[in-house]
Image: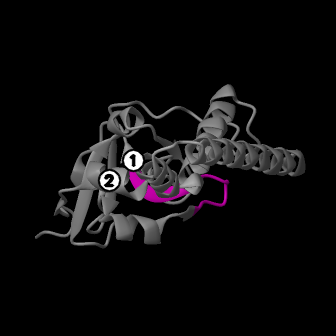
Amino acid sequence: MMENWDNLKNRIEAYIQNQIKAYLLFTEISASELSSSEKRDQILEAIKQGTKEERLQKYFNDLQRLVEESGDSPHNESVQRIPDEALVVRGGRNLPEDIRRGTGTHPCGVTGISVQCALGLPLKELAINIRNGQVGVTTVGEVRKAGGDVIRTSGSPHHATLSGLTPEKISNLLTPTVPNPARQQ
């Protein structure tokens, strides 16, 4: 079943990439037809600024979340949706470049950044496994409002992966940081 899932993921990812390429090509051709070179240059620059990879990752993470919520995912048979009120904690400065550097794909297939997440636990308890002197804090609900999600993944007891957002959006959610209460005496 895992092999079928991986094949399906690869086919869907390729399909989405092709759709994005077709959309961008259409937009570029449409922009090139404009009589105003200034407007054309503005549109073409806007196209270049929009990162295809971030949009592809968001589409893919949305699809993966839907599959996991349906219970059909081979990665985790008992996936439970994390409540919106749950705290999300990540160590470090949480600047966009820190988020970019920390982004990876968890062995279960979810791409994003590692966080600690739980409902009803105080910040100090969630920060116990975080070595950094400062932490960023938000809620699952705020992540979802921004267009991302937090998915329970293996690791420490409260490990999860925050996915589906740009490093800038993640940074905005996790800054300003606060002193790590688990490291203070």
User: Quick check: can you spot residue 129?
Assistant: no
Q: In what element is the residue under mark 1?
A: strand
- On screen, 52 above or below 12? below
| Front position in the image: 39 or 93 | 39
What is the C-alpha distance between the residues marked 1 and 2?
6 Å
Magenta range is 105-116
Left or right, 93 with reference to 48: left
Image point 35% across, 33% down: which residue?
141
Crowd band around label 2 with a 10 angstrom C-alpha radius: few (<14), some (14–19), many (20+): many
Left or right, 124 with reference to 39: left
Residue, disc 1: 117
Q: Position of residue 99 (x, y in %)?
A: 40, 64
Whether residue 27 appears in magenta in the rendering, the answer is no
Q: Position of residue 87 (x, y in %)?
A: 31, 43
* Circles 1 and 2: CB atoms closer than 8 Å: yes
Quarter of the image with the C terminus is bottom left
Q: Position of residue 4 (x, y in %)?
A: 89, 45
Residue, disc 2: 89
* Color scheme of the displayed model: one colour
Q: Quadrant of residue 121?
A: top left
Closer to the chain start, of discs 1 and 2, is 2
Image point 29% across, 68% down: which residue?
92
Image point 37% across, 32% down: which residue?
145
User: Quick check: can you spot residue 151?
Assistant: yes
